[in-house]
Amino acid sequence: MTKPILLLDVDGPIADWKQGYIDRLNLATGLNYSIDDTGYNWSIEDDLKLDPTIAASIYAEMDGPGIAASLPSTPMAVDAVREHSTLYDLVFLTAYSRNSVDWVHGRGQWLIERFGREQGNKVIHTHYKYLVYGDVFIDDKVDHLVEWQHFWLEKLGRKPKAIRFTCGKTLSDTPEGIQTAKDWMELAKLLKH
Ligand SMILES: [Mg+2]
């Protein structure tokens, strides 16, 4: 019997892009921002009330060479992915940075370093995540999940399982039909059912 397909977003659940941004911001400003100062969304400049010029210069740095290959992993993610990949046909589903010179290559290296060649190469780089079928889809961006679940409901006549990974935050605005996991412990419980 084939294993169920698990689609897993990378930035947020397993690669800590935000921490990478904050590390560079702290270096550039000499200040000491923490990821806890940011909210759930991706508007770091609003969360930290950054000067727009500084925010833009750090965004530009994040599109520079070598960034995708050098991001930190999120806590527990690597072990959890290894474990889930024994039960699921796990596929990384990730949107690349359009402005980066080497994002796709660097992300590929990053995944292979952590998960080995076979699992690390199971990656789909796309801005059209909804087109990819899976039995389960995990993403931190709720819009992706809504769009994906709606698309496959139309195709299949049933809703495949969508899980919002909230990166440690407790959120109350998740749409009906989408499950929520704050961390990898909660996610493991949802994947067992
Ligand atoms: Mg993400």
Image (spheres, rainbow, N blue to C red):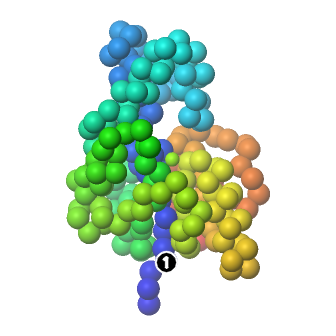
| Residue 63 x %, y % | 37, 34
Q: Quadrant of residue 179?
A: bottom right
Determine crowd level at label 1: few under 14, some 14-19, many 20+ residues with C-alpha closer than 10 A. few
Asked if residue 192 can be seen in this view, the reply is: no
Residue situated in front as seen by the camera: 155 or 4: 155
Residue situated in front as seen by the camera: 97 or 140: 97
| Residue 144 x %, y % | 61, 54
| Residue 34 x %, y % | 45, 22
Q: Which residue is at a point 46% across and 15% down the rendered structure image? A: 54
At numbered mark 1, what does the secondary structure look like: helix, strand or loop?
loop
Q: Where 113 sits versus 41, above or below?
A: below
Q: Amino acid at mark 1?
A: Pro
Q: Looking at this view, name the residue that lies furthest to the bottom.
A: 1
Q: Which residue is at a point 23% across and 62% down the rendered structure image? A: 116
Q: Which residue is at a point 34% across and 45% down the rendered structure image? A: 103
Q: Which residue is at a point 66% across and 71% down the rendered structure image? A: 152
Q: Where 189 sits versus 166, above or below?
A: below
Asked if residue 103 can be seen in this view, the reply is: yes
The residue pinned by badge 1 equals 4
162 lies left or right of 132: right
Quadrant of the drawing holding the C terminus: bottom right
